[in-house]
Each structure stands twice: as structure tokens, then as C-alpha cells.
Amino acid sequence: MLGEFRPGRSIYVQGAVGEPLALHGILLAAPEAMAGVKVTGCFLPGINSFDYAALHEGARLITFMLPPAMRPSYEVGRTGVAALAYSQIAERYSAGAPVDLAVLQVTPPDNQGLCSFGPCADFAPLVWPRARRRLAFVNAALPRSRRGPTIPYAAIEVAIHVDGPFITTEAEAPTVQQLDISNHIAALIPDGAAVQTGIGAAPAAALAGLLHHRRLRVRSGMVTPGYRALDEAGALARGAGHVTGLALGPADFVSWAVRAFTFADATITHGAHALALSSPLFAINSALEVDLLGQANIERRGERLVSGLGGAPDFARAARISPGGRGVLALPSTTRGGEVSRIVARLASPTVSIGREFADLVVTEHGVADLRGTCMDQRARALVAIADPAHRSRLEGEWSSLRRRL
């Protein structure tokens, strides 16, 4: 297997919940295999925790978000972060230069000789047909998706059979603050809507407010345990072909999800025009901070890069062109125990992740700011009104000063 890792080779390693955990031990035992290797993959904060570029000073990694574990190699210049949204990553993998080697995780083949990607179909199905060679960890423990992309076992040049863990996460009970946000969001979403939720506690918790809705359709890049609760409550439409790219949660949830959802690659789950046909689309994502112009930062704390664009910009655009759809940014009003407001006069970050032209609805535990069709003063007032009360007076003063300079 290590013979496939050669200097000068470009290697795609499947990320998110599809990352093959067995690969870590192999590379840790022989870090020299990473000399001169260039790895690419979509690794996610809170999910992926292995730093490939730290194994050897000659290793390089290109990712699209920045998990904390990769921070050391990022700081010394071995890891680069490409500022691409999911739809652009999909385009890069499906139409850009092919990789020399694709490293995948799949299920054992079925009676037709086809291996499933299990609970992670975001980018690997786009990469493997164009890769010059394919190495797959064939994991007997990985649950097979009933409806999703496959790869012929015969197309795998190097197959490593394992029976071990795959990436799961523990479910977390929503906080009172998150439930307040959820209830505000629930009042915005009609029965029969298509729903998407992104990375973060607030979007995941938003599903708790939808248990009494009916005929909801799922059009999400990721599903979490809240969707199972919706299904069991009768909130999801029957026979609607609910679509996702990956399932994130405990093992029992993942085993349920691969039976309940259609899994698709990111050209489908994040393609704005296809998503817009799922009207009305309600896209629920989060942000680290939102300023009084309606601009959102989802990538940086201060000037420090902690994440990436992900799929939020794709869904914001799709919701904007979806008839009756809305883009929702859900976030607690403060952080650090209430000391720091997440509604700010101007972004501290040098990066605008989601522009003000895509700001529809911003939701905190204090209410909803509807920014559609508003002028600058109107949106500033609406956003101050959903900030934590302890910070509103200061924000009003900062806006007054800022407005005079605009």
C-alpha cells in the first residue's frame, strides 16, 4: 500500500465522515511515505482530526476548511486552505486536473460487485472516475446506503479489507438558548417546505422546532439526528426522496440514515439551480458573527482562520432564487458567557463569507431580523433589536458613528 505514496504524487484522501481511520496508523508507522506527497481533501472542523502534512517536512496538504488538528502544519506553510464553497470544490474535483491516487473508504461489494460509499457521498464519487489509480479501504463495518453512488470493486486497484470503526459523533441535547432560536425559526417555515441545515449547533438544534410540521422535504448537504426525530414525529413527507451528502451522528443514527435518505455528490446537493427547484427552500446555517450591514463571517475568529466557506454560500444563493425560499442565519447573540456580542457593528474578520445581498433572515434567541428589501438604517435597527440587550446601546452608538463615515 505504501508504495502508492510516492514523491510528486497528488493524492485525494476522502474527508468528512468518509475519512478512512485505518490510514492513520499506517502513515504514523511510516511517516517517510509522505515525503514529497501532495494531499487534497475536504476535511471538516469537529470531524477530522489527523494532520497529514505534519508527518513529514516534505508533505503538503490542500484543504477547504481548517480543522484545529491541521493548525500546526498550516502555521508552518505545509497546509493551504482554498477559499471555495462546496459547489466550487465539486467543480474542481469533477473538471479540474485529475489526481494520481484516490484514497477512499467503501463497503464490501454487493452481489453485483458494487461498493457503496456508505454515509459519505460528497466528493469521492466525483474523484474516483478521474483518478489515475484507486486505493480503497473496504470496511466491513461501514453501513451501505440503499440509494447512493457506488464504485465497482473491479475498478479498485488496491483494496485493503478492514473491519473497524468509522467516524461518528455523539448527539448533543440542545440548550435553552438554541431551543429559543429553534422556535423562532419554526414560525418562519411552512408545511411542505424543503429544509437544509448546515454545520453548527444552532442549525442542528433548529430541527427541534419542526416536529409538528408536515410534508417537509430534506435537501441538505448533511443530516444530523434531528432529522430522525422529524421522521418519527411524522414531519417528513413520505416518498419524497429526501437527499443528502453525508450523515453525521452516532452509529445507530448513521445506520438509520443510510436506509432513509438518498445520498448524492456535491454537484447535486449543493447545485444552486437544482436546489432552487425544491421550492420553497429554507436554508438554515450559522455564522460566527453578523454585522449591522448584514454581512456574515463564518470562517474566522478575529483574524484567525478556524473554518472555511463550506456549503453555506451555496445554500444562501439557492434560497434566494427559490420561489418562496429564505436563507436563515441562526446564531446565539453572544459568546464567552455573554461578554462578546455576535451581532457586531463591523466584522472583525478581514473576510466577508456571505455578502449582505444574500442576507434574508438572521435569528438569535431574541428574535428574527428580516433584512429583505431593507435600507441600511432599517437593517441595522433590525439587527440591534435581536442582539443581547446588554450590547444594544453600544451597537446603536457604533452604528451612528459608522453611518456618518459610509
Image (tube, rainbow, N blue to C red):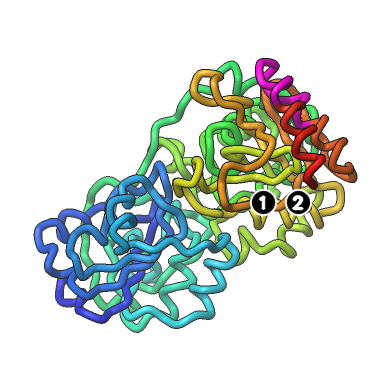
For the N terminus, the quadrant is bottom left
Q: Which residues are magenta?
A: 383-394
Q: Residue at x 78, y 24 (%)?
A: 385
Q: Residue at x 62, y 34 (%)?
A: 231
Residue 101 seen in the current view: yes
Per the image, label 1 sits on a secondary structure element best described as loop
Magenta stretch: dominant secondary structure: helix
Q: Are marks 2 and 1 in contact (CB under 8 Å)?
A: yes
Q: Is residue 209 magenta?
A: no
| Residue matched to label 1 | 354
In the image, 112 versus 294, the foreground residue is 294
Mark 2 — residue?
Answer: 358
Q: Which residue type does callout 2 highlight? A: Phe
Query: Residue 289 placed where, x, y %?
Result: 61, 38
Q: Out of 267 and 110, give the one closest to the viewer.
A: 267
Q: Is residue 368 left or right of residue 228?
A: right
Q: Residues within 10 Å of mark 2 (few under 14, many from 20)?
A: many
Viewer-proximal residue, 138 or 329?
329
